[in-house]
Image (cartoon, helix red, strand yellow):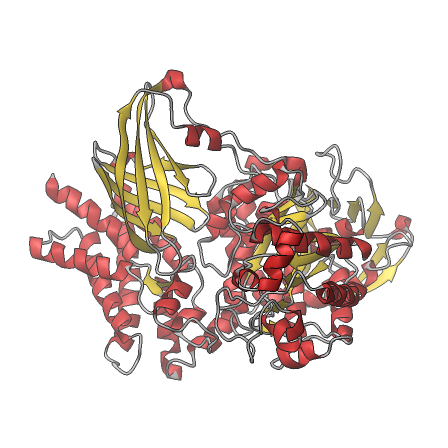
Amino acid sequence: MRVSLWLGLLLSCSVCAAETALIPAPSQLDLRSGHFRLPTRLQVSAPAEATRLKQQLARFIRSNQLDIELRWVDPSQAQLIFEFSPNADSQHSQSRRGAYQLNIGSQQIRVSAADPDGWFYALQSMQQLLLRTPHAQLPALTLTDSPRFDWRGLLLDPARHFLSIPLLKRQIDLMAAVKLNVLHLHLTDDQGWRFESKRFPKLQQLGGQDGYYTQDELKELVQYAKAQAVRIVPEIDLPGHTTALGLAYPELMAAPAPSQIEQHWGVHKAVLDPSNEQVYRFLHQLLEELTSIFPDQYLHIGGDEVLPDHWLASPEIRRFMQQQQLQDAHALQAYFNRRLLSIVQLLGKTMIGWDEVIDHPLPASVTVQSWRGTESLLQATALGHPAILSTGYYLDQPQSAAYHYRNDPLPAQVRLPDSASLRGWSLYSLEFARKRGTPVTGQLLITDLQQSQPRAFLLFAGKALIEARLSPATQSSTSWQLHFDSWMGPVSADLELSEALSGTLVVGNAPYPVAGQALTLQSTSALPSSFSAASSTTARPELVLGGEIALWSELISTELIDIRLWPNALAVAERLWSDARIKDEQSFYQRQSHWLQWAEQYNSLQLQQQQRAGLQRLVKPAQLGALMTLSEVMEPAHYYHRLHEKSVAGRYFRQPLTAWVDFLPAEHQAMRQFEQLVQRWIQQPKAGLTQKLIQQLQRWQQAALVFSQQPQLEFAPLAQQTHALSQIGMALVQQRQLSPAELNQARAALQQAAGIQQEMIIALQRPLQQLLQQAEGNSAR
């Protein structure tokens, strides 16, 4: 049998079978009948310049626990042939680095690639294709593949919580398995300095007391990564985020530095003095050391979140600004960045900065990393800067994998309806307050169309235009339900619109009250100019290098890094490698589940191990299984809600990460599957579905019962609520008629469970809300 898979066809059910469940999804895969059985003596040929291939093949055999001896022979005798081919990816007119074609027959495997990275990526695909039945074999197929973007990155932040060299190597192994190719190391911040400077040793002596990397360790790490087709880009954050630097060399700062390393999170006032020539001599020597260790073309200088307080409070710096005709703090930072750029260029490197570096003009040679929103990516490319997207890829902000999967470095342009199709429009202001930071403000535009459903658009202050999806089932003259993706994560809104706007926004998984006013009702004039202007902006594709995952480590440590990183990093890896038209979220989740099982066994993933180790510290050994089960219904509060909760509670500082919430993944497969069952049941409540739902609810209820009577446990109230919610759920799926009092009780219980408690959300309330709405609808009828 021959199955041809191309783009959308790639994501048919066939791909979800174990032998083709690849992440990232390839450009094209033709599956044939038959297999290649790996012999105990495998004859291999490759060009003489394939210097890294022997090491990579040995690693392939070792990590897959294969008993195979390699014999290097001429191509005419080989069973596994590696060859160069400039047209390895025939689907693209110009192959990107890493393109390859893998042809597996029953007698021979041929790997054609445009460069050695392509051979390596072919091996990564072969790892996932490998079957053990019980003999090691590979399915017969032809696979053609090429990356969509050249920059497929991951930022790790050892500055806030130190990450050991063995851990970094393990993460490089996992990066390579999903074809991520840039490791961005954030080496310095207010809370730590991790790079050994031999010229300025006080940096690590004072800023790296809980750990730093020696130059020899970093050189060896660079070589380890190179063998895995991963580049390492270092970041020294300047001129802000420099408390650790100022602690060592206070004479370089705009104001006296603190007397100890910073323990609190957030943005701090420590900043270098741009008027001090000694600063630039220091940075030249420091960066010269750095570039002698990291050979990559790029050097990241940070440039983000600079507070100008110390600059503006200094008479000397204000006088310097006048002499240099610098109008404000933005201009002063731009002056500093231009001086820094000249140093970076003298060292033969390309400078990268966070998107604040374009708040004031810089030469277009500077690469911009967008973190505040996609609008900064659009702005950067409009100014001619190469750009990298990180907005939407912050995995330290827990979100569903589907949200990251939908987030594209080249999003489709949001277009407003044309005037000919409009009957009218209404405009509302809206605002909601977060527990930390300024309130989020924006406007909601509802367009009434002649021959189709109304459409909704949102324009938040300083952000790109968003189109929301309307839910027709709840649409009425005043009640609307909206769904949209934002820089904060996925948002759902239940709104009442009249002379005023009111309702609830669920940001990620946490609810916030939202309010506003009608600004214009049922206008037939031209659409607001602010919306029209926002809809015309697009990125220049040729300047978008790709994207980069960010895993900031305020809430990350060695003991839980895989829980936060690897379920959802797969979504980003596929978005950055695979064709843009591959979008089937259900297919992705099925392949994600397969990959996670494979990586736990044959790569170095420790997700399950880390979760079990963390949870077993909280309960008695005999209760670990029950807590693992109960964890299926819980989620950490998404977005930055956890840090906001800590800020309100006065715990916004470095502390042990040992609570239940620290060992919960952003979402759980069991809960996602339960929500899908509920959707199917609502559409058609078959007896078999009813039984499955009841069995799962009973399972969670029994696990909750283990802890609900242990008041000494901090999370006992959450167990009690889960026990009660499970009972409500069983009553709803059994379609038992609930009294008005029971309905009120259920509403109150679900409302409580929807709120943030101990930095967590009881995710079970989401599908139960849907069941309750169904029951209320039935009662009304």
Residue 556 seen from this side: yes
Residue at 15% in and 42% down: 778
Q: Is residue 425 above or below residue 85?
A: above
Above or below: residue 385 compared with residue 121:
above
Task: Identify which residue, 309 or 94, lies in the foreground.
Answer: 309
Foreground residue among 232 and 334: 334
Q: Quadrant of residue 66?
A: bottom right
Q: Is residue 282 left or right of residue 552?
A: right
Q: Quadrant of the N terminus?
A: top right
Q: Quadrant of the C terminus?
A: top left
> Whole-percent x and y of residue 130?
65, 56
Q: Identify the residue at horizontal 79%, vertical 37% (top origin).
A: 87
Say whether residue 684 is visible.
no
Where does the image place residue 398, in percent across and percent down from the top left? Answer: 45, 59
Question: Image point 24% across, 67% down: which residue?
Answer: 721
The furthest residue to the top: 420
- Asked which quadrant contains residue 561, the reply is bottom right
On the image, the x and y values in percent for residue 200 come to 74, 75
Above or below, 281 against 405 in this view is below
Q: Point out residue 677 in the picture as x, y percentages from the top left corner.
A: 33, 50
Residue at left offset 56%, top offset 77% = 261
